[in-house]
Each structure stands twice: as structure tokens, then as C-alpha cells.
Amino acid sequence: MRVLVTGSAGFIGHALSRRLLSEGHAVTGFDGFSDYYDVGLKRARHADLAGFPAFQAVEARLETPGALLDTVARHRPEIVVHLAAQAGVRYSLENPAAYVEANIVGTANLLEALRAHPVRHLLLASTSSAYGGGATSPFRETDRSVTPVSFYAATKLATEAMAHSYAHLFGVPTTALRFFTVYGPWGRPDMALFLFTRKILVGQPIEVFSGGSAERDFTYIDDLVEGLVRLMDRVPPKPGEGGPIGEADTLSPVAPYRLVNIGGGRPVRLGRMIDVLEEALGRSAERIPLPLPPGDVTATRASTALLQALIGTVPETPIETGIPAFVRWYREVYRTDVQPAG
């Protein structure tokens, strides 16, 4: 296949691109290398992908007029996986304009490009944060999501709605995907696991929100990528050409569009995650308890009924395996106990 991956220098984009390239597919990687976190890590991810002859890199920003249209017209992908976005719940309180530009304007630019040059399937990354306040556990795709508690979540909900409208109006087959706390090697420096690892290794205290009682549905990167790859062939049918596959299905009655969770469905307390990390590092952490920040939720847990109905059982890597794998990668990359500045 010819696949366009936006955000290919990002954590998930790099892992997905590497998997596709290793299986013989051609990947065009589109990334703007924003400085939200260490650009050097993003460059290293793209350098890793450059070792595959079938990888072509496009350095451009989503919101730049014509950049996505030109890329789609030139490379003519069959599948598009839209992972590029301005991420981060807390940063959205500081710089909401970045979320409007990248998430809303950028996604609109992509949808217009696909309107002009149709593809077989668009897979659109969203977030478990979209479930918002008052969501009941487990989070089901059929639940009404109208109460986002962060601006980040609000922009991702907007991209889901925008994609549905293009699926209805212009027949762009779309699967929107809500990810649940993805972690693993090559992970994001702004995420808790990366932050905690760095601080514990240099003897700094770590800030533990909600006293460690908050729960997250941690999803190992390889498990998420497996789900993405299998979903590529599960193109939502047009109205009248196929019906829902069960009560959990979110297939739109007016468009080739559905919404799917990708998570393990087995939340872990933050305190337990830190215990496992301490064991993998061979060091104890000084924990500073803090209240939950604005925009965060106390717990996330994915319903996996629809995902399993679509693709069958996917691997569920426990944190007792996934966290040590991350620690091994971290120590190999940074070599010392002190992470380089940047």
C-alpha cells in the first residue's frame, strides 16, 4: 500500500511508519517538527525511518496553505493516517491558539486535500480525553461526548465532527480513533513515564497527582500499532452497503464513518505504575502529592467491545513488561542517568 502518515516524527507516527515499512509498504511521512518537545528526538525518529528505501519525508506544517494538498496530489496515498496534532491537556491552557491552528485548521486542510484526491480509508487520531467530564467507566464509543474538560479535548471532538461531515458530504471513508495513554520506547518527553524516569534517575522528586490514586488505561505502543494496522482494512461501508456489526458499533447511518477506542480496557493506578517503574530502574522515587490539575480526569478505561468485533483480539502488554522495555530504550538512548538538555 501507499500510506500517508501525518505526524511521522511523533511517537505513534514513527512506530506505525516503521511497522508499515518493515512489511513492505510505501510510507510518506508528513511532519512539521514543532518545538512543543525536544525536536532532536523527532529528528532521530525520522532518521530511523530514513533507513527504509520506501520512506519519503515531507517537512511541512498542517496549517500551511496548500502543503497537505500538494503532498496528497504528489504521492497519491491509498490510506491516510492522521496522527499529527498539537497534543497535551495542560499546554492547551497556556497556548490554545496552537490547538486551533494544528488540530482544527490542520485537519480541515487535510479533509480538503482528500476531497480533491479521494483515498480508500482515512484513519483519524482522537483521544480518550474526548469523553470529558461525567463519563462512566468503561468509556463506550456510543456514549454521548459533549462535556470536554480541556480545550485540547474540545479541538479533538471538533476534528471528529469535521471528519464525519466530510464522510457524509464527500464520501471520505473515515475511522476516528480514541487513544488511551500510549507509552513505550521512543515515547513523548511530556508524558508521565518519561518525566518520572528522567527525574528518578537524577535524584529529583516526582509530582504525583491525586496522590497516585488516578487511574489510566495504559496502552503499549506495539499493541496500539497492531490495532491501527488491522483497522486499515476495516473500511466503514457507505449507507445502504452494510449495517452495524453489533450493538457496540458506531457506524454512522448517514456516512461511511465510525468511532473506535484503542485501549486495553484495564486501568492501572498511577501509584502502581510508579512502583513498577521504580523496580525497573532499581531506584526509589521521592513522591510529592499534588491535586489533579485542571483539565485532567480521575480515571480512564476503554470499552474494547467494538475494537474486538472489528479486528479480533489484540495483544495486551502489561505494564510489568512495557515499562521495563521503555526503561531499556531510555538508558540505551541517553546512556547516562542525566538526560541531555533540549
Image (cartoon, helix red, strand yellow):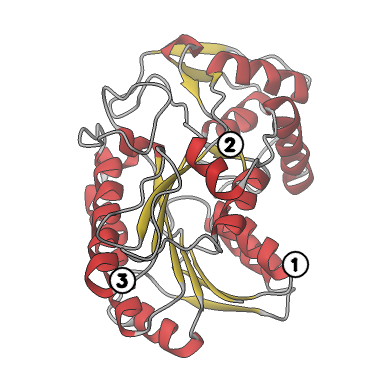
- Residue in the picture at 21% in, 32% down: 147
Residue 334 percent location from the top left of the image: 72, 45
Q: Quadrant of residue 154?
A: top left
Residue underneath mark 1:
22
Q: Are marks 2 and 1 in contact (CB under 8 Å)?
A: no
Give whichever of discs 2 and 3 has the lower sequence position.
3
- Residue in the picture at 26% in, 22% down: 134
Is 189 left, or right, of 201 in this rendering?
Answer: left
**Cα distance, mark 2 to mark 3?**
28 Å
Q: Which mark is residue 219?
A: 2
Q: Are marks 2 and 3 in contact (CB under 8 Å)?
A: no
Q: Dot 3: few (<14), some (14–19), or many (≥20) neighbours within 10 Å?
A: many
**Cα distance, mark 1 to mark 3?**
28 Å
Name which residue type carries label 1.
Answer: Ser
Residue 16 percent location from the top left of the image: 61, 59
Q: Quadrant of residue 173?
A: bottom left
Q: Give the secondary structure at mark 1.
A: helix
**Cα distance, mark 2 to mark 1?**
22 Å
- Residue in the picture at 28% in, 31% down: 132
- Residue in the picture at 67% in, 47% down: 222
Q: How many marks?
A: 3
Q: Are marks 1 and 3 in contact (CB under 8 Å)?
A: no
Give whichever of discs 1 and 3 has the lower sequence position.
1
Q: Which mark is residue 111?
A: 3
Residue 40, visible in the rendered structure: no
